[in-house]
Amino acid sequence: MLLPYILLRLRMLNNEKGATAVEYGLMVALIALAIIVAVTALGTQLSTLFDTITAAIKNA
């Protein structure tokens, strides 16, 4: 009676598909976060640069 339960638990321990999917999900989330931070940080600097270039062209 206990043997089927033990076999089921052993099969569940050997099944790593769910864990792999969670790991990939975490990696995608971290990459997305890094992209958002980079775009936010560089976006302000690029906006300032383009404003400076636009002003220089208008004054030329």
Image: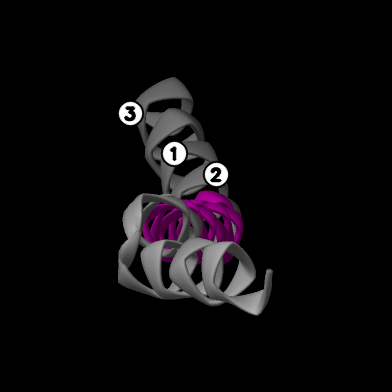
Residue designated by label 2: 47
Residue at 39% x, 39% y: name it. 56
Number of residues whose C-alpha sits closer than 10 Å to that of mark 2, classed few (under 14), some (14–19) or many (20 or more) = few
Real-space CA distance between mark 1 and mark 2, rounded to the nearest whole angstrom: 5 Å
| Secondary structure category for the residue under label 3 | loop
Label whose residue precedes the other's in the sequence (1 or 3): 1
The total of numbered circles placed on residues is 3
Callout 2: SS: helix
Number of the label disc, if any, that sits on residue 50: 1
Instruction: Where is residue 32? Give x, y as percent.
Output: 49, 51
Amino acid tagged 2: Ser
Q: Are marks 1 and 2 in contact (CB under 8 Å)?
A: yes
Residue occupying the far front of the picture = 1
Is 53 drawn above or below residue 57 in the view shown?
A: below
Q: Which mark is residue 20?
A: none
Q: Residue at left 44%, top 64%?
A: 19
SS label for mark 1: helix
User: In the rendered structure, which amino acid carries the disc numbered 1?
Assistant: Phe
Distance CA(mark 2)–CA(mark 3): 20 Å
Label 1 Cα neighbours within 10 Å, binned few <14 / some 14-19 / many ≥20: few
Locate the N terminus by quadrant: bottom right
Q: Which residue is mark 3?
A: 60
Q: Quadrant of the C terminus?
A: top left
Q: Residue furthest top?
A: 58
Amino acid at dot 3: Ala
Relative depth, front residue between 31 and 12? 12
Q: Nearer the viewer, residue 7 or 30?
A: 7
Q: Which residues are magenta?
A: 23-43
